[in-house]
Image (cartoon, coloured by chain):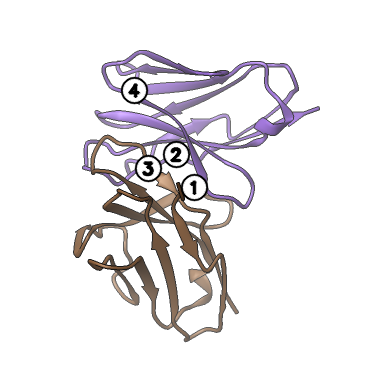
Amino acid sequence: SQQGEEDPQALSIQEGENATMNCSYKTSINNLQWYRQNSGRGLVHLILIRSNEREKHSGRLRVTLDTSKKSSSLLITASRAADTASYFCATDYNQGGKLIFGQGTELSVKP
Amino acid sequence: NAGVMQNPRHLVRRRGQEARLRCSPMKGHSHVYWYRQLPEEGLKFMVYLQKENIIDESGMPKERFSAEFPKEGPSILRIQQVVRGDSAAYFCASSPAGGAYEQYFGPGTRLTVT
């Protein structure tokens, strides 16, 4: 299976703290994407990072990509209760479109 | 600027009935993907379509499942003779092109088979 792994599976923090989630993948990629899913809802695209990029920012989000280690991390700074959700990494493994998702990290931010 | 639309949002079917799930992509998007999410699991790819073409159906179960994206109208995921194991959330996503583009997801259809 090409499915990557995410860790931790679950993360519980207090508001204001930073949250870091990690994603590992199996083979070479064009890009890696991060998505958020609130309970019972659809997925929201957060960031796409290409294989020739090492770091990307969007507001309080920072994504890094280390192609030598085949891993990526998502950092959420100054977390808020509204950040409580599941976070998934996904990549198409150069297969032209279909995304392979990790199992996700369930983040709980306590007020 | 409507996003990806899916309907119905909730669908209840008895075992043996047919389920039809619809997806209208974002305006200007001609690439549609279907994914299935079982309880407490991540999303699993099912099928990738362009208008009137199936590009990749490697994730579709061999029997009872079919998908289409006609020239006019929404994409349809059809499940015949549903079984309890088909109960899941089915998500549709669209993108302006294939390959290295972000995909925009609809709210999903939650299918319950009784």
Foreground of the two, B88 or B109: B109
Position of residue A32 relative to residue B107, above or below, is above
Foreground of the two, B26 or A59: B26
Residue B62: x %, y % from top left = 28, 70
Using the rendered image, report if marks 3 and 2 lie on a common chain.
Answer: no
The nearer-to-camera label among 3 and 4 is 3
Q: Considering the image in quadrants, where does the N terminus of chain A appear?
A: top left
Name the amino acid type tagged 3. Answer: Gln
Mark 1–mark 3 CB contact (< 8 Å): no
Choose the circle earlier in sequence order: 1 or 3. Answer: 1
As measured in the structure, the alpha-carbon distance from the residue carrying label 1 to the one carrying label 3 is 16 Å
Foreground of the two, A30 or B26: B26
Name the amino acid type tagged 4. Answer: Lys
Would you say A102 lies left or right of A76 here?
A: left
The answer to which quarter of the image holds residue B35 is bottom left
- Determine the colour of chain B: brown
**Disc 2 is attached to a residue of which chain?**
A
Q: Does dot 1 land on a helix, a strand or a loop?
A: loop
Using the rendered image, report if marks 2 and 4 lie on a common chain.
Answer: yes
Which mark is on residue A102? 2
Residue linked to disc 3: B103
The answer to which quarter of the image holds residue A26 is top left
**Disc 3 is attached to a residue of which chain?**
B
As measured in the structure, the alpha-carbon distance from the residue carrying label 3 to the one carrying label 2 is 16 Å
**Disc 1 is attached to a residue of which chain?**
B
Q: Within 10 Å of the Cα at label 3, are there few (<14), some (14-19), or many (20+) other Cα atoms?
A: many
